[in-house]
Amino acid sequence: MICPVCKGPLTVTVKEQKDFLGGQLTLVSMVCGRNGCPYRTLDILPQEGREPSRLTFEVKSEKDLNVLVARSSTARVIIPEIGATIEPGTASLGFITTIEGVLQRFVTHVREPRARRLVKELLKGKPFTIIIEDPYGNSGINSDRAVAELML
């Protein structure tokens, strides 16, 4: 395959694994092999259909920052306490990381000093809510305390 950005060689990896929700997933990643090209994508595809979902998790302590999160490329991530959102889009990447990893993504991409400071406070254990809205139901939060509801 050819990279859509630089026309260099594209490496495609397909891996199947069980997700923490009990279903089977297909992980598809594409990475450009040309030095310096930033193109990469990851998508998380369930092997069975799922309903649109809204997942909510209350982070109550620093320990909760280690909870595993899977976000598909179609999902929106919201932290209402600080007004922060990761929106899906055509070049959106899926990811599997911890809640701390999600916060680090905000720190990396937020330019406004006040917003960066607020995210850093959350990284120190200040309580907050993380919401993942996925119209295809392909995302998850690996905790018994995560609340899943049908998204209309």
Image: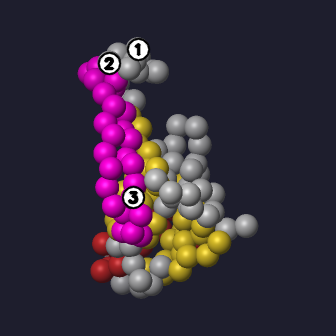
- Asked whether the viewer can see residue 69, the reply is no
Task: Place residue 102 in its image quadrant.
Answer: bottom left
State the image coordinates of residue 111 (x, y, percent, origin top left): 49, 49
Q: Amino acid at mark 1?
A: Lys
Task: Specify the quadrant of the image occupied by residue 136.
Answer: bottom right
Span highlighted in magenta in the image: 10-35
Q: What amino acid type should be assigned to the residue bearing mark 3?
A: Gln
- Residue 46: assigned label: none
**Earlier-in-chain disc, 3 versus 2:** 2
Residue highlighted by disc 1: 7
Residue of label 2:
9
Question: Which SS class for mark 1?
Answer: loop
Labels 1 and 3: the sequence-earlier one: 1
Which of label 1 and label 3 is nearer to you? 3
- Residue depicted at x 43% and y 80%: 59
**Which residue position is annotated with label 3?**
24
Residue lying furthest right in this view?
A: 152
Q: Is residue 13 above or below residue 135?
A: above
